[in-house]
Image (spheres, rainbow, N blue to C red):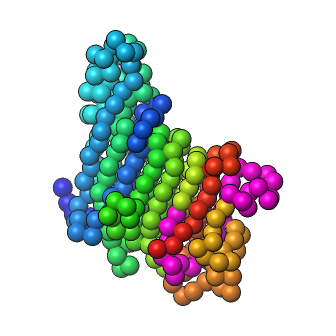
Amino acid sequence: MRAWAGEPITIDNGGINPAGGTTGVEVKVSSTATKITAEATFAAHADDDKESDAKLSIEEAIKTLVIEESANGFTVRCGHGGAHGSSSVAGSGCKILRVTIPAGSAQQPHTLTVGNGAGSIRVGLADAGDSAPYVKKLLVDNNGLGEVQLRVRPVKDADLVVTGEDAVSVALPSDFSSAKCTFTVDETDLTKANARINTSAFPGMASGSAYPVAGPTANAALNLNVQSKGPFDSDTLTISSF
């Protein structure tokens, strides 16, 4: 009901398992929006001849889609439906949860938390015509299979923690600086691990160091921590610029 005025925003999508096609959370960032809005595509898995089971689960899942407002901020949540015959709890819910948020500003940046149980997470992507949100604290955790793709504008002393199970890509402004960078992949062989981490858009950027190497700038972020938990060579980390 009320306009966003810098309060924390939490987005929590249970997802559907297994996830197929375009699934997960899409955070659209609008330079003209003043309020938080959400829409969803619901789905449920059931046996081919038991469509009625899936419909019952979907009816219940729809009721879980809420935007909660409190003194502590906004929470957008989508859960699961109940089990009905061949339709399971985990197999029903928001196949796609699309949330639109204001872009914020350097003076009023976001504290944004995004969690997802299955599918991808996409935030502020240029191919969707979105703005990149200004962020002071970003926590993204994708617990299911699916890529994580973000485009954000960190402000001074920002804290960014991004975790995914597959490939993870974070796009940052070309003048980005941070007091500390940490990049982690599920690989014990150092050569193979380095091959999965691409920071070429920011020459000299390396895990365990500040960026630039000569020292963070006056408007630097405090922390950039990006991790892929995936075990495969395709589970890469990419830090790009815009």
In the depicted structure, whether residue 139 falls above or below residue 55: below
Say which of 72 and 86 sits in front. 86
Question: Residue 183, percent across and down?
Answer: 66, 62
Give the image quarter of residue 223. bottom right
> Nearest the camera: 109 or 31?
31
* Total numbered labels: 0
Q: Residue at x 42, y 21 (%)?
A: 88
Q: Is residue 152 left or right of residue 81?
A: right
Residue range in magenta is: 170-196
Residue 197, horizontal then vertical, whole percent: 66, 61
Q: Quadrant of residue 215?
A: bottom right
In the rendered structure, the answer to whether residue 214 lies left or right of residue 174 reads right
Residue 96 falls in image quadrant: top left
State the residue at coordinates (30%, 17%).
51
Residue drawn at the location 69% of the way across and 71% of the way down? 206
Q: Is residue 193 magenta?
A: yes
* Residue 231 can be seen in this image: yes
Answer whether residue 73 is visible to the viewer in this image: no
* Residue 101 appears left or right of 1: right
Residue 64, magenta (yes or no): no
Q: Residue at x 51, y 44 (%)?
A: 146
Q: From this viewpoint, which residue is outermost toward the left?
A: 1
In the rendered image of this protein, does residue 227 appear above or below residue 199? above
Q: Position of residue 84 (x, y in %)?
A: 36, 16
Q: Quadrant of the N terminus?
A: bottom left
